[in-house]
Image (spheres, coloured by chain):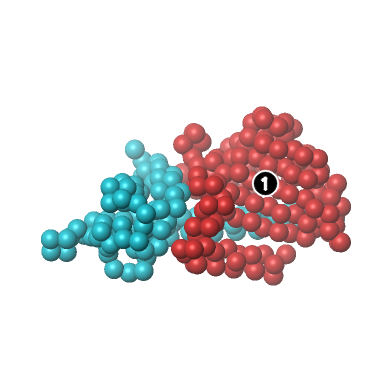
Amino acid sequence: MSRRIRKQRTKAVVFAALGDETRLLMIAKLKLGRPRSIAQLTAGSRLTRQAITKHLRVLEGAGLVHNVRAGRESLFALDPEPIEELRSYLERVSADWDEALRRLQAFVEV
Amino acid sequence: MATDRIEKRVELKAPVARVWKALTDYREFGEWFRVKLDGPFVVGEISRGHMTYPGYEHVKWEALVQKMEQERVFSFTWPHPKSFEKRDAPVDYSAEPKTLVEFRLEKSATGTLLVLTESGFDKLPADRRDEALRRNDGGWTEQMKSIGNYVAKNP
């Protein structure tokens, strides 16, 4: 598989991983800084530990979180890079539309 | 932070009928969008062609026309590979995320208000996602606001 295809797939996976309210909430929690344990991520949520673990696996699969060990504890930390990539992707799409709409404007305002 | 929805509002000094034609007549659309389309837009059918934008002539155009409501709404879904560089341009669009592009027209005091949205970069329904982003990540909505301001300042 070429690097490009891998990247494209990754992007689709990242979009899918972010397309869930629970996972967005988890990312928001992790964004605040320190790595969190599954227990910490479960606290304050209506979901079970098992459900949270399942969501963590999806985020892990998309490269959005990774596991870190702190002594006997297993923690999860955020990897912001795929989100940054999506952001710059959407900024490019947005800039393309700005340009296309300027051309449309010039086209109809004759 | 970005969100998965892009919205642009443009005030055009041209009648709604004029803008409608520029959007839905495939030859006119092709002129400003810079794509050579094989034939007219038909609801439910795939529009095909290739880009004419200099340097991107190798890029295929494919869009499934969703809505054509006379002088009100024109929409289509399209695959969204964003690297269109020659070495990267995908041959097969089936694995690419599809987004919905929607043009809405409204008569305004000076001509036409055009609202463009592109959505569906992820699969979460827009209302739930926006809600989630509002509550959890002010940054995402902030980013969209700044894009809105940019558009407002650069018509």
Left or right of B135 in this view: B21: right
Residue A28 visible in image: yes
Name the amino acid type tagged 1. Glu
- The residue labelled by disc 1 is B102
Q: Residue at x 60, y 55 (%)?
A: B6
Q: Residues within 10 Å of mark 1 (few under 14, many from 20)?
A: some
Q: Colour of chain A?
A: cyan
| Quadrant placement of the C terminus of chain B | bottom right
A40 to B38, vertically: above or below = below
Left or right of B55 in this view: B102: right
Q: Residue at x 64, y 51 (%)?
A: B117
Q: Residue at x 68, y 52 (%)?
A: B116
Specify the subunit that label 1 lies on.
B
Count the marks.
1
Residue B30 image point, x, y percent = 72, 42
Residue B12 image point, x, y percent = 80, 58
Q: Colour of chain B?
A: red
Is A38 in front, or is A91? A38
A105 to B29, vertically: above or below = below
A71 to B5, vertically: above or below = below
